[in-house]
Amino acid sequence: MSYSYIALGDSYTIGEQVLTAENFPHQLVTMLNAQGLKVAEPVIIATTGWTTDELATAIKERNIQDTFSFVTLLIGVNNQYRGRDLDNYRQEYTQLLDTAISYANGHVNNVFVLSIPDWGVTPFAEGRDRAQIAKDIDAYNAACKDITLAHKCHYLDITDSTRKNGTTPAYLAEDGLHPSGKEYKIWAERLVPMVVKVLKG
């Protein structure tokens, strides 16, 4: 039995400034293969800077007709960064989650959503209102979690890890903003048991 995987998102999915093998989708696949699950190379629709609507547009343009064994979705930081309206995020995120579910062939249990990292703790945010950024991210994540759980999909909080490690150079890419492979490894490690349980279920 072999499995397929599509990852939807932005810079945190593509792995801005890290090697492809070090982004979380590729590390996840490597770890799943090590567990004896034969998972193909991930299909990734993600670009640095994308907001919810930009990801939705790109998904339409790619027009992938296949369905996948499982799906990850991580989106929203750029909505927050650009000062977008939270209600707008709720609406567009819900549509993206519906798309993710359709990629999983309607299996809500095979969709895994990651929370939005807190970039406000990083060196890049120097001189900005870090407390306000944290508050905004928390509000976005609360909306994301509510919608995800209402759809009966899986929600994984990785924001705590980004807050803990976001000031440590080893866990950051060279830009002092995006995570390094070390941070992505933590996300992948947290995802592995969740995905294994569903695929072996």
Image (cartoon, grey):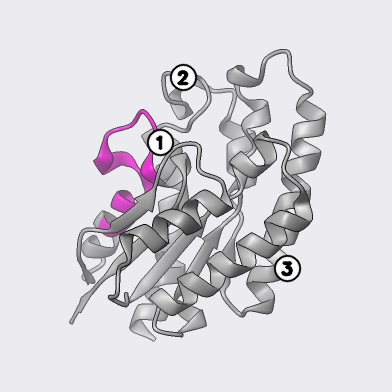
Assess disc 2: are there few (<14), some (14-19) or many (≥20) residues with their C-alpha within 10 Å of its C-alpha. few
Answer with left or right where residue 94 lies relative to residue 68. Answer: right
Residue at 21% over, 58% down: 41
Q: Which mark is residue 60?
A: none
Q: Read off the residue under disc 1.
A: 182
List x then y, in percent, for residue 33.
22, 63
Q: Is residue 18 visible?
A: yes
Query: Which residues lie in the magenta part?
Result: 14-29
Q: Which mark is residue 146?
A: 3
Mark 2 vs mark 3, CA separation in Å: 32 Å
Residue at 28% over, 75% down: 66
Answer with left or right where residue 81 lies relative to residue 53. Answer: right
Task: Judge whether 99 appears above or below 27 on screen.
Answer: below
Helix, strand or loop status at disc 1: helix
Total of numbered circles in the picture?
A: 3
Q: Read off the residue under disc 2.
A: 175
* Amino acid type, callout 3: Asp
